[in-house]
Amino acid sequence: MNKNQKWNIENSYSELPSCLFVNQLPEQSSNPTTKYFNTNLALDLGLQFLSDKEILDYFSGNLLPVGAKSISQAYAGHQFGNFTMLGDGRAVLLCEQITPKNKKYDIQLKGSGKTPFSRRGDGKATLSSVLREFLISEAMYYLGVPTSRSLAVIQTGQKVYREKPYDGGILTRVSSSHIRFGTFEYLNRFCSNEELLIFSNYVIDRHYPHVKNTENPYLSFIEAVMIKQIDLVIHWMRIGFIHGVMNTDNMSIFGETIDYGPCAFMNIYDPKTVFSSIDRGGRYAFGNQPDILYWNLIVLVNALLPLLSNDKKKSIDLGSSIIDKFSQIFTEKWYNMMLMKLGISNRDNDDKELVDLLLEMMIKFKSDYTNTFAALTLGIEPEDSSLLSSDEFKFWKKRWTAQVDAPTNKNLKLDLMKKNNPISIPRNHLVESALKSAVNGNFSEYDNLLNLIKNPYNYKSNNFLQIIPEGFDDSYKTFCGT
Ligand code: AMP
Ligand code: MG
């Protein structure tokens, strides 16, 4: 190793009030092997110098980088509507790395063994769940969605016992932070108002410094978080992503997608789509995600009430004044996004109807969400699409074309559509098949998929639509993947 090349470490979280974390070493891995190392991300982080041996040692939990004070974070959360104490039960924050561009990222090991927050769990992760998160989080990154990223996948060499033994894995997860809505709920419930204040100031400094000079920084903070989260969920709606477990402990305060568990991509457009085996009531269905975000924001506001004013009634009024804007802001931003998928950037009021009518037809004709918009972008009419060959669609298309095909709009339209409509996404059947082969030692499908997800908007060399095996979704279920 070149001696000028070393980690650039901070441990700012471990300087916070002690109720927020416990000092925690990762468990040792007996016989680890590196399955993946994300060299592009390593370069961005300023960690490109790591040797193969160092990669293995650090990301298997066998060695701490010099200067790292590893911890597990305390947090609580509402899971399916019920308040619960949680915390990093299978994760360790190794350290924060300051990048060459002076940005701070958490470097976390997920699946690195028991912690005081493990409850009855073993603190471990299966290699399959780690490979799934690596693939989908990287796919989200290339789709242009704010997300945690994945630096390394290590096979631990130990078995993890679920309903049967599986190979164990550790994911190195990189995120702007791992601070959750539930971290504030935890402070509100179990710590002092003074600690809540210190922590909130820390989060504002770290993620939202621009709110510091406003009249009520904590209120502006809530508003800034709301906007970030709205933008995030609108990205999810744009690409047909179903997070699957939008509990408040899985909502990042910085508005990144975190905690990839039972997530999946919708094929046929239906707002009621849900794949998670534990989501029997459809609480986290595709079309419910905006309402759940609103619900989660109310929980966040509740946790922050002590900081808004000394008078509880006034705090509630102040918090409500922000939250009450949610619906209008979300709807406006959502229509803007949907219209961009249709190539329309400066919209008229009745353009909203174009979106509503198209989505209604897509439900009626059971159209694939991604392929419909990709087909519109390519200007093709696939033979198997009953929607695109229907009379009502042709009528709709005339109206849409009249709006967007004025000569001055045409190039702009195509440009917008190509940026907002992926032509390929990690389809559920591809993900499952690649994982199945990978855990049996054959990584070629997985590697192909890792390549595919790097160019989701590549309309140049890739102008065919993905084919989904008929009936696949009917029986498809996803699991929390512990
Ligand atoms: P998740 O479903 O990944 O959001 O996790 C919810 C909570 O369960 C968090 O507190 C996790 O740390 C904890 N947890 C999940 N899996 C395990 C495990 N295998 N061992 C210990 N804790 C776990
Ligand atoms: Mg979680």
Image (cartoon, rainbow, N blue to C red):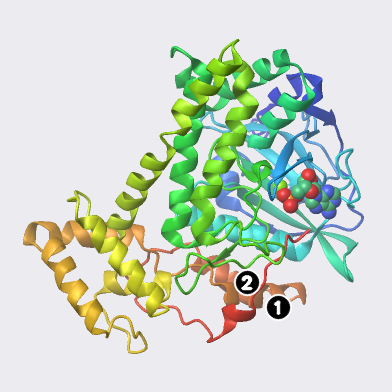
Query: Quadrant location of residue 252?
Result: top right
Q: Position of residue 399 (x, y in %)?
A: 15, 68
Could you tell whether 397 is left or right of 330 in the image?
left
Residue that label 2 marks: 446
**Left or right: 327, with 34 as reference point:** left
Give, as a three-letter code, the residue at label 1.
Ser
| 10 Å crowding of disc 2: few (<14), some (14-19), many (20+) | many
Asked whether disc 2 touches disc 1, contact meaning CB atoms under 8 Å apart, the reply is yes
Image quadrant occupied by the C terminus: bottom right
Cβ of disc 2 within 8 Å of ligand 1?
Answer: no
**Does residue 378 appear left or right of residue 305 in this picture?**
left
Could you say where residue 369 lies in the image, as x and y percent from the top left? Answer: 42, 70
Q: Is residue 349 left or right of residue 230?
A: left
Q: Is residue 187 visible?
A: yes
Question: Which one is in front, 12 or 61?
Answer: 12
Residue beneath the point at 86% across and 34% down: 24
Which of marks 1 and 2 precedes in the sequence? 1
- Which disc, if any, is residue 190? none
Mark 2 and mark 1: span between their CA atoms? 8 Å
- Classify 19 as above or below 229: above
Q: Residue under circle 1? A: 437
Q: Amino acid at mark 2?
A: Tyr
Residue 478 placement (x, y as % from top left): 68, 67
Instruction: Report which quarter residue 67 is drawn in.
Output: top right
Give the residue displayed 51% in from the left and 28% down from the top. Answer: 222
Is the CB–ligand 1 distance for label 1 below 8 Å? Answer: no
Q: Nearer the viewer, residue 40 or 6?
A: 40
432 up-or-down from 73: above or below = below
Query: Which secondary structure lies at badge 2?
Result: helix
Residue at coordinates 61% horizontally, 62% vertically from top-left? Answer: 282
At a point 58% along the width and 82% down the height, the residue shown is: 472
